[in-house]
Every structure is written in structure tokens, then in C-alpha cells.
Amino acid sequence: MSNEPSETEGADASRRGSLPAAATTAAAIAAGGAPSAAPAASRGAAAAPPRTLGRTGVQVEAVSLGGEGILRTTGRHREAVPVILEALRLGVRYCDTAPAYQQSQDYYGEAFRAAGPRAREQVFLASKTHARDRDGALRLLDDSLRRLGTDHLDLWQLHDLRELDELDAIFGKGGAIEAVEQARADGRVRHVGITGHHDPQILVEAMRRYPVDTVLCAINPADPARLPFLTTVVEEARRRGVGVIGMKIMAAGRLLQDRAASPSELIRYAASHADTVIIGCSSIAEVRENLGARSLPFPMPPAERAALEARVAPRAGRYDAFKA
């Protein structure tokens, strides 16, 4: 669901030199270099401590790898796989993808094969299902496992929830929640989550209907202006012990295009509310920059968050176009 930056940004930089970087990174990981192979400067000498992802009990870092950016493309393995390999080299803990993200899952599968047998088990791997029925969801799950080259997902999420009738379908007879229960029972799925950026009340209602482990929702400084997720979804998740994952933290790159805020400000803002934030990357350089933000000071002080919200409020509608 995260689409910061757009899939074309940084493509030329990624194209230049991607094959040597991929070969070197894969060799380092296969030799047992991940995550410790990451240079100290990249990981940050005073990196913020890991956080617990709600009731999953899993330790995650403030910044994680999103499944979009260059990963939400088709036929661009030569650029996309090195992005994942670099994130693995830098010790990424949480990796996001989805069937709806074109060949994102295929790129992950190729990267895990290149990096060696330990690579997959060193990350918390999250994918999704956009099917609302049991049989359709199970078909998507089995296809995801095949494409990712794994026998289980650490997190399987009900993707992009928007309407009450979707919840009725999911939680009704023959709905996708039956696929969730079956997959958890047979070990194909360890944890279950929900995602959405359209209407916060739909995510709140979903949490009321089922004890999910995580929620992936939109978090950026334009949020308080309209249909806020922070004072609804995030507060409800915290009350229930549900892990919070942030997306849309750069508003599809628009906050950066307008120079309304810096990447570090936006990461610090979102990660001050979420357990981790996912960011789509378009090049190895972006991976290094974004994962390097793990060493930023967290949380952002309340006064600084308020000032950032006030700064973007006049154009908030431009930054929350994904909402209802």
C-alpha cells in the first residue's frame, strides 16, 4: 500500500551499476553476512532500539522495506532485485509485498534465492490478499508462497479495506476470514492483519469484528486535517494491543515534491506513531538513505509534530487524496 516514492523515481540511478551491486550483496549475505555485513555508518552508531510489533511479539525497526517503488513493476528484475538485496544486507527486519503489486513477490523470491537459504528466515515477511472470499483468498495465498519461495508468511493481511459490505463478505460464511483461520491452523500463516487508507472507521470496525495482530494505515502530518487515522485507528489499535505499521508517509512523494517537509521529518513523524513504517524504494541509494533513518532520534517531540502538521495543513487535501 505504500507508494512513496513513485515507481519511476530513481530508476535511472538504480539501473546504473545494479548488477555488480547485486552480485556483491548476494555473495555477502550467502556467506552469512546479513545483517552484520551492514557498515556501521549505514546502520547508525546510535540506532534507535527495535520496537515490538503489537501482540506478534516480533521486534521491528522504525523503518522497513515497502513493496512498492521499483518493486511494484513488471519485468524489471535487474533493478528491483538489487534493491531487496541491499535492504537484506543492511539488516532489514520487516518486508512488505502483495499480489496486487505486479511482480513484487517475484522479485522477493528471486532475491531470497540469490541471498542464500538464511535470508528468508531473517525477515518478517508480510503479504496480503485482496480476495474477500475463502477460496479466492486461499488461491492467492498459495500463489504468494510459490512466488516468494517460502512455505509460510509471517503476516497475511486483508488488503485495502474500504466498505462495510467488504467486511460483511470477509467475516460472513465462506469469507476470507475462513481462509485466515485455515491457513493459521496449517502453518501457512503465522499472524493476520488488515490494511487500508480510505476510511479509518472501516479499519476500526474490522478490529472490533476480529482480533487481528496488526493494522497497516496511512500516517503523515496531513492526517489530522480530515478523516484522521491517528486519533481513530492508531488509538484503537493501541487499546487492543494491535501492532501499527505506517504507510503513505510521504503522500506518494507529494510532500517531498512540494518541499513541504524533508524525508527525515516525515519518517520521524510517522515512526513516532507507528511501530514501523514501510517505504517503497526505487534505487539502492534510496534503500540506504531510508534505512539509514533508523538512527534518527525517536520519537519526534510533540511540539515538533504539531509544527509540522501546521506547516502542511494549508495543502492537506493534496496530501490525503487517497482518503474517501
Image (spheres, grey):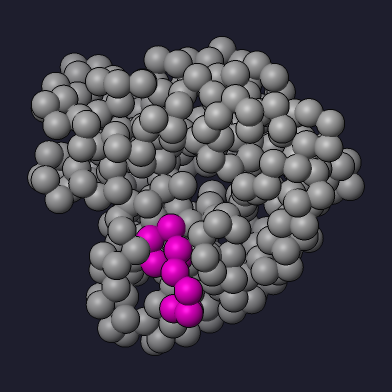
- The main secondary structure of the magenta stretch is loop
> What residue is shown at x 36% (from left), y 21% (from top)?
227
Decide: is 285 above or below 250: below
Residue shown at 30% from the left, 37% from the top: 321
Q: Which image quarter is the C terminus in?
A: top left
Q: Position of residue 317 (x, y in %)?
A: 22, 31
Nearer to me, 234 or 288? 234
Residue 76 covered by magenta stretch: yes
Which residue is depicted at the point 60% across and 35% down? 194
The x and y percentages for residue 296 are 28, 40
Q: Which residue lies furthest to the right in this view?
A: 186
Q: Quadrant of residue 49?
A: top left
Q: Position of residue 38 (x, y in %)?
A: 42, 63
Indicate yes or no whether the magenta region holds residue 267.
no
Rendered view: 214 above or below 151: above
Q: What stretch is highlighted in magenta?
A: 68-77
Q: Is residue 147 visible?
A: yes
> Left or right: 17 with respect to 217?
left
In front of the other: 245 or 139: 139
Query: Residue at left 84%, top 31%?
Result: 173
Name the side, left or right, on which 75 lies relative to 221. right
Q: Determine whether 138 is above or below 323 in the image.
A: below
